[in-house]
Amino acid sequence: MAETILFVDDDANFLASLRRSLRGLDIETEPDPALALEKVSARGRYAVIVADMRMPGVDGIRLLATAARKSPETVRIMLTGHPDMSTAIDAVNKGQVYRFLTKPCSTVALKETLDAALIQHRLRVEAPDAELRQEPGEPGKTPLGLGRLVGQSRKMRDIFALTRQLAAVDTTVLITGESGTGKELIAEALHTLGPRAQKPLIRVNCSALAPSLLESELFGHVRGAFTGAVKDTVGRFQAAQGGTLFLDEIGDIPQSVQIRLLRFLEQKEYERVGDHATIRADVRVVAATNVNLLHKVREGLFREDLYYRLRVVEIALPPLRERAEDIPLLVEHFVRHFGGKFGKSISGVSGDMLALFLRYPWPGNVRELKHALEHAAVLCQDGTITSAHLPPELADFAQSRGFDPLHPAAGGPGRGDLLEALNRTDWNKAKAARMLGVSRSTLYRKLLEYHITRFPG
């Protein structure tokens, strides 16, 4: 389906410059606001409409209001070249427009805004009411992602495809990735999309249990096995019979447990602590870690044979900073979720905040983004989330970098602009250069200047 962007501005020279700088996008331009109003009234189904706030005859506010009534899924952006922007700001805060741009605005800022707006439009078309709408006949698969995972980037689509494939295969899977990337949600999808879905999914955080307790927790114990063992206790393996056992933070298990886990993976049997009777179990094991297990193997802290038993297939989750194109999608998802949870009518985040989110490094990944938006949703009374609602670490980041999303630093794109463009184009340098509005030679020079490589170190 075509995603047409309509630009309405009585400045013909400005529209001509847009046609030159936005090649590759499906755009229409209209210098006559009255004719634009007729187009919107007749057709309506534009993905994005960008209109100047002040035009003769029909102003931008009226035009965008008509678009909202005709086609609610259309994303509306207001342009203003006037110093008094209170009307535009008020329209954003009331949710009447997605964001406003001040003229003149850079090509980078304009493309960034349009890219985010097109993602917003897809969200409104594909899932206007449901938080995660399932497709008929495919439980757990949604237009937004897989199960409770949200993402449409190339990296995440590949991971979703691999997860669906592995769900049907009864093999051990090792999920790797930084904290907050969604490892537990992948384990959940592997279980719910597979033949064991009607059986238990038992979760164990190996780092949350003392080493002396972990063995008993996993395999169970009999009365008298140790001081305090006053009755027989079922372990997690027995509780997961027929289903899936998810072992999170597997790198933290002690050597004694490693040996017993290896035996189970090889023979599908174990003994409870303090008992000699062998128990057979039908349990799929899925493990996860946020550390480099191979380094632990080399240091003698993790058994090599267990490592390869666990890592029959690995699903490596990327950090959020490496799939920045998913941030607008995640923001929309969490804003809708927390707006409903707190009973607030929150239309989204301001364009400036979305630009900030795209450049922030997110050391806590999706979990940090979720908590940041929960914090903002608590403080936002209704309307749009703005800088006033940010948690301290994001506010400090914006202040320390002198962040200005509409005007990149003089001298061309900075390090943050480069990384953002590269991540959003999966490191396709030609596409990144076009997104930034620079030549490829300039892009390469900037990469050398900032010592940027895809695989640092």
Image (tube, grey):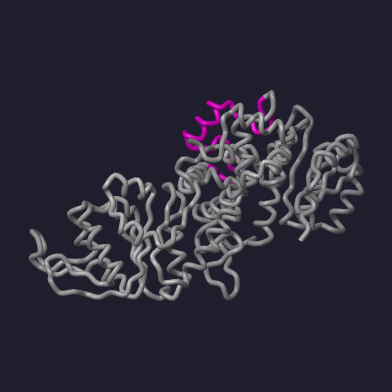
Residue 393 part of the magenta-drawn span: yes
Residue 383 shows up from this direction: no
Q: Position of residue 365 (x, y in %)?
A: 48, 45
Q: Position of residue 391 (x, y in %)?
A: 48, 37
Of 191 and 12, nearer the camera is 191
Q: Position of residue 56 (x, y in %)?
A: 90, 38
Question: In which quadrant of the rendered view does residue 239 lie?
Answer: bottom left
Q: Looking at the figure, which quarter contains the N terminus?
A: bottom right
Total labels: the figure holds: 0
Residue 170 shows up from this direction: yes
Lateral position of residue 198 relative to residue 416, left or right: left
Of 29 and 245, nearer the camera is 245
Name the outermost residue toward the top. 410
Q: Position of residue 295 (x, y in %)?
A: 35, 45
Of 149 and 302, nearer the camera is 302
Position of residue 77 relative to residue 188, above or below, is: above
Q: In the rendered structure, which segment of residues is drawn in magenta?
A: 380-409
Q: Residue at x 38, y 47 (%)?
A: 292
Position of residue 114 relative to residue 245, above or below, is: above
Lateral position of residue 306 relative to residue 334, left or right: left
Position of residue 111 relative to residue 184, above or below, is: above
Lateral position of residue 262 relative to residue 81, left or right: left
Of 347 and 144, nearer the camera is 144
Residue 79 part of the magenta-drawn span: no
